[in-house]
């Protein structure tokens, strides 16, 4: 997992419409890069809606939100449409970016182990440096915590 003070690894992933989005294309803005397990699940929906509800304040503070999951662009279209998400969702279908960021890890549920995304948020500054990491995010209150960090 990249650490605070290190450059955020650059990547390119398709957005919900299939258009390529490059992290380095956001230089000059702060980026809230959040990795989440799956569209349309309760925790992921709550997290996305929390960022949605704070999006105007996040943008006013000079930041953008990028959500990344292993879901397809097609599924992101449905998710973003259903919950009116105003920010970009990126499809990391082969989990390559999640692996690069150290959030593709072994998880367990009901006694079964599997590989999946561990909910994690990175705050990246205008120069592309990681300034804050929230590993193993608990959804409740996370949007407020991220907004406070952006505002400094």
Image (cartoon, rainbow, N blue to C red):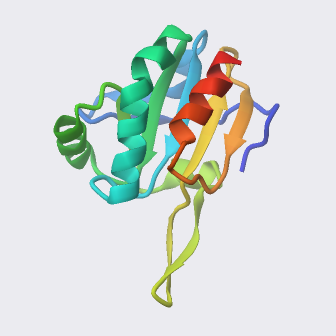
Residue furthest out toward the right: 5
Residue 109 shows in the view: yes
Tell whether 13 sits left or right of 128.
Answer: left
- Percent across and percent down for residue 63 are 54, 17
Residue furthest out toward the bottom: 111
Q: Nearer the viewer, residue 43 or 80?
A: 43
In which quadrant of the rendered image does the C terminus lie? top right
Which residue appears at 55% of the width and 30% of the height?
A: 32
Relative height, residue 125 to residue 14 (above, below)? above
Relative height, residue 29 to residue 17 (above, below)? above
- Percent across and percent down for residue 150 are 63, 21
State how many labels appear. 0
Tell whether 107 sits left or right of 149.
Answer: left
Which residue appears at 56% of the width and 54% of the height?
A: 138
Relative height, residue 136 to residue 12 (above, below)? below
Residue 10 shows in the view: no
- Percent across and percent down for residue 113 are 52, 83
Tell whether 24 sits left or right of 80.
Answer: right
- Percent across and percent down for residue 50 are 41, 37
Q: Nearer the viewer, residue 28 or 96?
A: 28
Which residue appears at 42% of the width and 57% of the height?
A: 94
Which residue appears at 23% of the width and 44% of the height?
A: 79
Q: Nearer the viewer, residue 66 or 139?
A: 139
């Amino acid at each position: 997992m990249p650490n605070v003070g290190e450059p955020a690894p650059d990547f390119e992933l398709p957005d919900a419409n299939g258009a390529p989005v490059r992290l380095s294309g956001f230089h000059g803005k702060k980026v809230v890069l959040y990795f989440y397990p799956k569209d349309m699940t309760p925790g992921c929906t709550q997290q996305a809606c929390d960022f949605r509800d704070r999006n105007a304040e996040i943008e006013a503070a000079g930041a953008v939100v990028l959500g990344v999951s292993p879901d397809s662009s097609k599924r992101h279209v449905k998710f973003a449409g259903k919950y009116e998400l105003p920010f970009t969702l990126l499809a990391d279908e082969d989990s390559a970016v999640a692996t690069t960021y150290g959030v593709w890890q072994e998880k367990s549920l009901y006694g079964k182990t599997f590989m999946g995304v561990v909910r994690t948020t990175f705050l990246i500054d205008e120069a592309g440096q990681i300034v804050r990491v929230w590993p193993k995010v608990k959804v409740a209150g996370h949007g407020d915590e991220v907004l406070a960090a952006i505002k400094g």
